[in-house]
């Protein structure tokens, strides 16, 4: 049967429309808040997340700095995902950015995928807002680490929250693994923490693993081993 969807998100940021445009329409900009590493070349947006390549997304409209849209091609079963960004400058240096994600998920078992997509998009848009408010103009170095397969998600999240001292509220100061920061986002499948050097995210992977998907804005060293160890320790404690 399948499911057609449209998911709107809107937020006000302290960045200029030009800074927002760079964040939504360039490879380094998209990399600095979305998943994995992105590039925009020859009118096509390409994103790699860990060892996975997302379907290429063709730019369908680009009106700087006000509107940017791109969409994947429809597959034989009708699947596609499209993104539209609208940017509006306001008085006193603020900007309103709106992201509308639409598309179609095929099959009769689309519910779980749609839930994961919805919760993930909430986190990615919250990350875009946080990036524009605190790190605008800086390019992230993405860190993506997949943990072991999870059998009980409720127990896995209980383990994450136990590390934080309980279920946090937005604005709480917490220690997540080796970093300390402020919680900027939390829903049933994702958590985002802003630290001095980056944005640190933990998410429930649709493939069955807890994922550390971080964005670091300093030169830094190799932090993947520390996060892999953290994910493995959490997994062992929950078994």
Image (spheres, rainbow, N blue to C red):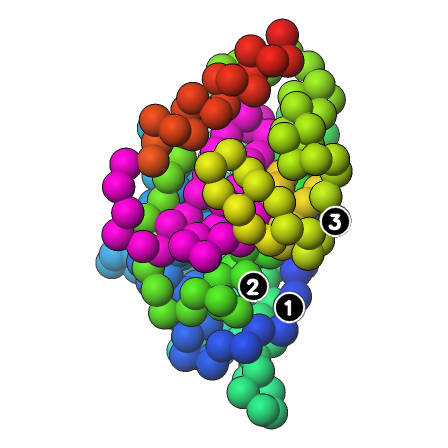
Confirm whether the magenta stretch covers residue 153.
no
Vertical placement of residue 94 versus 148, above or below: below
In the shown orientation, is residue 154 left or right of residue 53? Answer: right
Decide which of 231, 12 is in the foreground and name it: 231
Task: Say which residue appears at 73% left-offset and 22% top-offset.
Answer: 154
Q: Main secondary structure of the magenta part?
A: strand
Task: Say which residue appears at 57% left-offset and 34% top-offset.
Answer: 203
Decide which of 69, 144 is in the foreground and name it: 144
Q: Which residues are magenta?
A: 193-222
Would you say the residues marked 3 and 1 are in contact, meaning their CB atoms lie under 8 Å apart? no
x and y percent of residue 199 in the render?
48, 51
Spatial CA distance of label 2 from label 1 is 7 Å
Q: Earlier in the sequence, mark 3 or mark 1?
A: 1
x and y percent of residue 238 in the render?
64, 13
Spatial CA distance of label 3 from label 1 is 19 Å
Decide which of 186, 222 is in the foreground and name it: 222
x and y percent of residue 190 in the render?
63, 39
Q: Quadrant of the N terminus?
A: top right
Q: Quadrant of residue 115?
A: top right
Q: Quadrant of the C terminus?
A: top right
Report helix, strand or loop for mark 1: strand
Q: Say which residue label 3 marks.
A: 169
Q: Say which residue label 1 marks.
A: 11
Q: Earlier in the sequence, mark 3 or mark 2?
A: 2
Q: Earlier in the sequence, mark 2 or mark 1?
A: 1
In the shown orientation, is residue 136 left or right of residue 169? Answer: left
Q: Say which residue label 2 marks.
A: 129
């Amino acid at each position: 049967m399948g499911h057609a969807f449209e998911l709107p998100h809107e937020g006000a940021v302290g960045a200029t429309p030009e800074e927002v445009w760079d964040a939504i329409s360039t490879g380094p900009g998209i990399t600095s808040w979305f998943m994995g590493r992105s590039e925009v070349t020859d009118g096509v947006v390409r994103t790699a997340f860990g060892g996975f390549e997302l379907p290429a997304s063709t730019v369908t409209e680009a009106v700087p700095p006000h509107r940017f849209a791109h969409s994947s091609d429809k597959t034989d079963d009708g699947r596609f995902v499209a993104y539209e960004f609208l940017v509006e400058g306001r008085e006193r240096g603020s900007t309103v950015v709106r992201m509308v994600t639409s598309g179609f998920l095929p099959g009769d078992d689309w519910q779980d995928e749609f839930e994961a997509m919805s919760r993930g998009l909430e986190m990615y848009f919250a990350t875009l807002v946080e990036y524009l408010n605190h790190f605008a103009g800086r390019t992230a170095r993405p860190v993506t680490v997949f943990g072991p397969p999870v059998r009980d998600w409720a127990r896995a999240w209980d383990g994450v929250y136990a590390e934080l001292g309980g279920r946090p509220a937005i604005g709480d100061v917490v220690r997540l693994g080796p970093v300390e920061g402020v919680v900027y986002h939390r829903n049933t499948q994702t958590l985002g923490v802003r630290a001095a050097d980056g944005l640190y995210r933990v998410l429930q992977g649709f493939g069955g693993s807890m994922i550390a998907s971080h964005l670091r804005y300093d030169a830094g060293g190799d932090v993947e081993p520390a996060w892999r160890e953290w994910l493995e320790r959490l997994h062992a404690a929950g078994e």
